[in-house]
Amino acid sequence: MKKHVETILWIINILGLYFFWNYADYIVRFIIIMLYFKISGINIKKYFKPSKINIFLICKLLLFILAIDRLCYLYSFIPHDIKYAFVFFKNNFQTIVFQDIFYKYNSDIYQLILTISLTPLFEEIFYRGYLYNGLKLTYSNRNAAIIISGMIFGIYHIPRYGYDFGIIILVLLGIALAHCYEKTGTIWTPIIMHSLYNILINFGKLLTMPFYIILMFTYIILGGIVGTVELIKYLKRRKTFNDIQSYSPS
């Protein structure tokens, strides 16, 4: 019995060390942020106030970001891959089975759980709760704070993702997350959006090439529709504003 207990404790210790050494940066950052809030007398609960979470805004921004993301990586899908997907569906459309759709997912389960839960929580507390609010107070300019915090968010991820189009997407994602936070007044909104983004990105990694290409073009089409609709709405608002200005007494 004692031997079994020692074995269990040894496994727990190994898992604990694995978790700590792989995710120590999250733990350290979280402790520093909590200490900062404590010293500054900031009640972190105010960031989590139960304001109305705008799911429609989250979906619009997600589709737009994912569309740009897939467009940036479209160059990597040579015509051969697209042709392969077309031939696959032409020849196998009525006989597709589960194995034709999904790869066996071999990712670290701990990393996956963190990616869709703790990572969005910690990063949003830091980048939106701490950094964005601090920049907004420093510059007294909401738009400047949104852009700068988004750029820092993207730059932070360079060691992990390298210098490619992915950093541009992460800068845009950071800007969108700050915009969501500013619009709704609760950090729950960017946390949910961040988590959904990570879920969708990891879902794409599960798909075989033909279905991944379908998903890629789905994002591009839906994101293009969202972008077009928002552009039309913006142009209409500008036209209305200009009309009012032109008819106002000088």
Image: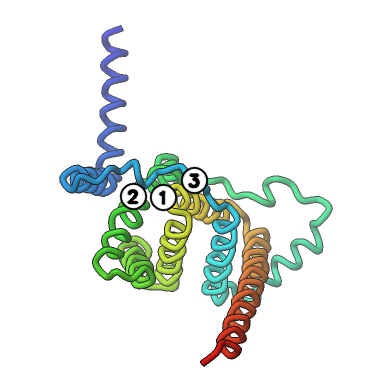
* 220, above or below 101, in the image: below
Describe residue 123's horizontal placement relative to residue 209 as left or right: left
List x then y, in percent, for residue 101. Answer: 67, 51
SS for callout 2: helix
* 94, above or below 78, in the image: above
| Residue at image point 24% right, 46% down | 42
Task: Pick the quarter of the image with the N terminus.
Answer: top left
130 or 41, which is in the foreground?
41
114 or 55, which is in the foreground?
55
| Residue at image point 35% right, 44% down | 46
Q: Residues within 10 Å of mark 2 (few under 14, many from 20)?
A: many
Q: Can residue 97 be seen in this view?
A: yes
Q: Distance between the residues labelled 3 and 2?
A: 30 Å
The residue carrying mark 1 is 187
Quadrant of the image occupied by residue 49: top left
Callout 1 amino acid: Ile
The residue carrying mark 3 is 106
Whether label 2 touches label 1, CB < 8 Å: yes
List x then y, in percent, for residue 132. Answer: 32, 61
The residue carrying mark 2 is 125
Callout 2 amino acid: Ile
SS for callout 3: loop
* 238, above or below 129, in the image: below
Callout 3 amino acid: Asn
Q: Earlier in the sequence, mark 2 or mark 1?
A: 2
Tell which tag, 2 or 1, sits nearer the viewer. 1
212 or 176, which is in the foreground?
176
